[in-house]
Amino acid sequence: MGISGGIQSPSEVARCEDPAISATLPCASCWSKDYTKEIQVYTGKRYSDQLNVAGESYDYNFGTVQYKLKILCKTKKIVVVEIRFKIESDDAVNDSAVAQAKKSLTEGVKKYWGNQFLLKISDPKCGTQILPIEFKVLFVNSDEHYIFKIHDKYDREGVTGNVLDVSKDTGPWTYAHEFGHCYGLPDEYGYNPDAEENDQVVYYKPDRSLDSPISVPYNGGDPSDPASTIMAAYGNTIILKRHGWIIAIEANEIFNERGLGRRIICDIV
């Protein structure tokens, strides 16, 4: 990280080399800048994977996801996951319907994803910061992450490539579920109608190890099932720490790609 406040004195340098001291009294070079990165990654075997009952990968091609990750550890003490949407709509969709769709998307993200996660950043020299994670929707005319395609009627909303297809009357919960896909979350249900037993979804943890596989039903679960989540069953609102691991994975790369000479560890708490 860059040093602010001029050249450090010998006593300051010595203090910064002692983690026990710098953890409680950070040196001038600690948390001295914010980090911003445009994320564009292929999600398969990076964030998650879908397996059959024997644990064999289907090798589905889920494509890439795009978003902007801001780790504001110097200024605002917050992490922001920002997704930019460019609106396209059917001729039958009027301005009022477009405005309502924008409102429903924004409200769905705020209601269901707001105040869900904290990013813990552990630096062996500077100690620990724990920052709240905010999910933010922006509507733009260009340089979008996704096309927000509003149809008069669309049978099953979804994200295909960089297009989010919805109906003009799509509700906030569905927007929240699809927003999860936009930043890399998988469906927690199976796609294979011929599977004799439940398929599995497995997540990668922030340290890149695999979590235990989750048994998932075909084509969506029961929202009243205690094992269901917002990514598994229509109307379910349960969000778990694993749904934030994506952010910690990318944060780890941001902090450790800069040649600091020490490993900074990020996790979701």
Image (tube, rainbow, N blue to C red):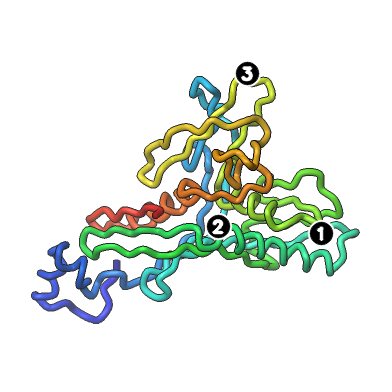
Indicate the amino acid at tag 2: Tyr
Residue at the far bottom in the pictured view: 5
The residue shown at (60%, 64%) is 110
Quadrant assignment for the C terminus: bottom left
Q: Earlier in the sequence, mark 1 or mark 2?
A: 2
70 left or right, relative to 107: left
Q: Quadrant of residue 254?
A: bottom left
The residue shown at (38%, 41%) is 208
Q: CA distance from mark 3 to mark 1?
A: 40 Å
Q: Which mark is residue 89?
A: 1
The residue shown at (67%, 48%) is 235
Relative to 183, is 104 above or below?
below
Residue 106 screen position, x and y as percent: 66, 64
Q: Quadrant of residue 119?
A: bottom left
Q: Earlier in the sequence, mark 3 or mark 1?
A: 1
Relative to 33, is 178 above or below?
above
Indicate the amino acid at tag 1: Ser
**Foreground tag (2 vs 3):** 3
Local packing at callout 2 (Cα closer than 10 Å; few below 14, some 14-19, many 20+) is: many
Q: Which mark is residue 196?
A: 3
Pointers 2 and 3 in contact (C-beta within 8 Å):
no
Quadrant assignment for the N terminus: bottom left
Q: Earlier in the sequence, mark 2 or mark 3?
A: 2
Local packing at callout 3 (Cα closer than 10 Å; few below 14, some 14-19, many 20+) is: few
Query: Disc 2 designates what residue?
Result: 67
